[in-house]
Image: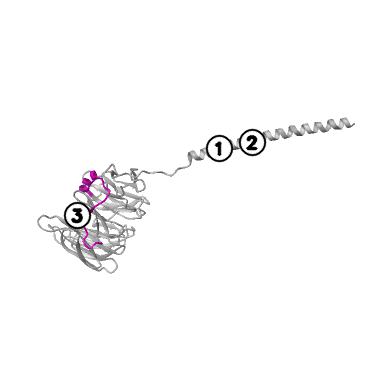
Amino acid sequence: MAKKITIFFVFILAALAMFLAGYLISKKSLTGGQNQQALINNSLVSRFEESPEKHVSPIGLFALSQDRATFPTLSADGKEIFYYNPDSGEIRSVSTQNMAGGSTLAAKIQPGARQISWASNKTLVATYSNNSIFYDLNSNSSKKLDSKIKNPVLSRAGDKLAYNYFDTETGEGSISIADPTAEIFKTLLSTRFENWQISWLNSDVLFLVTRPALGNSVFSLFTLDTTTKALHGVLDSKNNLEVVWSPSGQKIVYSYSIGPAQESGLYFMDLANREEVGLNATLNASKCTWSIDDKTIYCAGKDSFVVLDTSLASPIPENIPNVPKENLDSSATATNLLLTSAEDYLVFRNSQNGKLYGLNLNR
């Protein structure tokens, strides 16, 4: 009897051992499969997970566009530079985070615009030979404005439109403001001048430049308060006057010509004291742009790019540092200057080939 009990326990132990061995083998196999799957999954994540882009900053002077570029502007967030191709009507953008990455198509409007007024809310007004058109790039819509509306400009926010409403048959007109599509308007100033140059100084004040008589090059500068309708003279009877306002709207850099040589001298004025300060430079203000610090200006001269500090008692133009010598000559054809928001690049249009260029200011 004892022998039978012993055989029974041996049999039970053998069976239990076989069961445990099978369990351990299956668990090892399962664990190995899970580990293998985990490795596969990690591999897929590594393969398809987007890695941060690394861009190499271009050195010296480089092309930003391969096509004609007009009316360049910096987006409200500073991340893009927009420009317009008058041949195709394309509006293209260049990323300020990847200046050497080329341009991308942002929108397409009617070609042949003579002027573009940009707003920060992705709206614009394009002026053509016979009319102007308001475009809303958000809704992909447009509206043709009345043909009597001359020189329309959008406010920076895009909520207002300023223009000269002028009837060529009667020779009478008015400076007015309206909603962006010019449906509801307000007359500010009656005028007999058709060719006012109009811009927004801030959300409530316009600045106006006009020539007082036909057949000459004498200009005057005014500010016009859109709330009170008060008109104030700033500069009077200047030959070939060109003006660039500072970011704060309280200072101007301007140029005008004196004497038979007709060379333009560059000047500075703080509107707080209205004192004219000579900047010791023979430059056109249209080839200058302000720094965000409201005191420094960058300009393109005949043979170099220069920087001036208007806060000094006697400002003197100095060559922008770190500009390679072989790039200095490009200053002669540089127009439409603007700085990126980080002020690490100077952007301009080449007046000869019509293309847009960038100049690295840090190297």
Q: Residues within 10 Å of mark 1 (few under 14, many from 20)?
A: few
Query: Mark 3 or mark 1, which has the lower sequence index?
Result: 1
Residue annotated with mark 3: 284
Q: Residues within 10 Å of mark 2 (few under 14, many from 20)?
A: few
Whether tag 2 and tag 1 are in contact, CB under 8 A, the answer is: no
Type of amino acid at the residue the image marks with label 3: Asn
Figure disc tally: 3
Residue 314 forms part of the magenta stretch: yes
> Where is residue 16 drawn, in percent x and y?
76, 34
> Does 327 sit left or right of 341 as displayed?
left
> Where is residue 18 drawn, in percent x and y?
74, 32
- Which residues fall within the magenta stretch? 311-334
Type of amino acid at the residue the image marks with label 2: Leu
Q: Indicate the quadrant containing the N terminus: top left, top right, bottom left or bottom right.
A: top right
> Where is residue 309 drawn, in percent x and y?
25, 58
Residue 291 seen in the figure? yes
> Where is residue 288 drawn, in percent x and y?
24, 54
Type of amino acid at the residue the image marks with label 1: Leu
Residue annotated with mark 2: 30
Q: Secondary structure at mark 3?
A: loop
Colour logic:
one colour
